[in-house]
Amino acid sequence: MKLVFIHGRDQQGKDADQLQRVWEEAFDCGLDKAGLPRPQNLIVHFPYYGDALDELVKQLDEPLLVDIKSKGVKPDTPEAGFRGQLLTEIATNAAIPDAEIAASAGVSVQEKGPLNWAWVHAILRTLDKESPFGDAVLDGFTRDVYVYLTYPAVSKRIDAIVAKTIPLGEPCVVVAHSLGTIVAYQVLSDLAQAVDVCGLVTVGSPLGLASIRDHLPVPLARPTGVKNWQNAFDKRDVVALLPLDGTTWSIQPPIENFSGVDNFTDNRHGISGYLDDATVARWMAKALI
C-alpha cells in the first residue's frame, strides 16, 4: 500500500530524500516500540514543498511580527490581526496568565488585545520563556500559516505538489504534521471521493485552533474519501494543545485523539518525536494492512 507523508513549514533548503528517511526511520522506531513488523510492499511518497513555500513567502514579502513593530508597519491589517489572534489563542490554551504577559510588556492587563503590538510581542517573549518552541519559530509559524490560508495562489501551488502524490482510486494512508495537517485537510477535501484514504493520521496539528478553523475555505467535516481519522499530540506542544474532538471539531464520525505522546524533540513538536510513538505507529500499521 502507499503511504503519503506531508511535512510542515520551515523545511526550505533541505534534501527531500533525507527528510523522507528521517520520517521513515522514526516510523520504524515506533513500530519497534509497538512490537510490530514494517508493513510489506510499502510504497512511500514524500511530496516536498519546502522550497516552494519559502519562495512564495519571500515574493509576498509578508513581514515577521518583529518587523511589523520595528519598521512601523500598520498593525490593523488582516494579516496582523490574524496573527495577533492566533498568538493570543495559543497563550490562552497554554494557560499563561495575563498578568505574566503584562509584566513582560510593561503594560496593564486592560491594554491586552491582538492589535496591541506591545501585548502581542509580550506573548511571544512569554511563550519563549514558558515553552521550548521559541519566539522566532512561533513568529514564522504564524506568518506561514497566514500566507497559506489567505493567498489562493500559494495554497493552489502547495496543494498541487501534494495532490499529485496521492493515488486516485487506490487505497493509501496519509500522515501529516503541523502546517502539513492543514494542507492535507484541504487537499483531501478537494479530492473528495476520488481518493481512498484508509487512514488519515495527523500529528502536532494546529487545526484545533479557532483562528485557523475560521479561515479554512471548506466547512468542518471529515473529507469524503477518508475512512478513518486519528490525531495525536504532546500536551506540551503549544501549537497542538487542543484535541480535534467535539469541542473543536464537531464532526461525525468523530476523530480519535491521543494526547499521550512524549515528544522527545527540543520543542516537543518535531516529527521524529511523533512518529516514534508506539500508538501513532500502531495506528499507521493497522491502516496499512
Image (cartoon, rainbow, N blue to C red):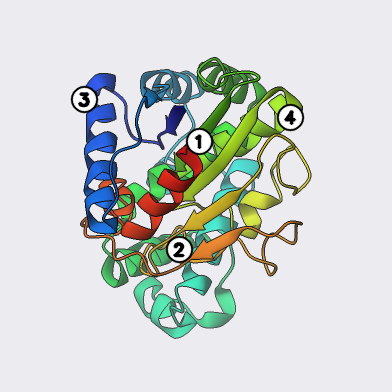
Viewer-side residue, 103 vs 3: 3
Tell me which amino acid carries mark 4: Ala
- Between disc 2 and disc 4, the foreground one is 4
Secondary structure type for disc 3: helix
> Distance from label 1 to label 3 (Cα)?
19 Å
Residue 34, above or below 221: below
- Between disc 1 and disc 2, the foreground one is 1
Tell me which amino acid carries mark 3: Gln
Estimate how packed mark 3 is, as few (under 14), some (14 to 19) or many (20 or more) residues with alpha carbons within 10 Å: few
Identify the disc placed on residue 118.
2
Identify the disc placed on residue 174.
1
Q: Is 20 left or right of 242, judged from the image as shown? A: left
Residue 203, above or below 243: above
Tell me which amino acid carries mark 2: Ala
Residue 32, above or below 185: below
Secondary structure type for disc 4: helix
Asked if the residue at tag 2 contacts the one at tag 1, i.e. Cβ–Cβ closer than 8 Å, the answer is no
The residue under the point 71% across, 51% down is 214
**Residue annotated with mark 3:** 18
Tell me which amino acid carries mark 1: Val
**Residue annotated with mark 4:** 192
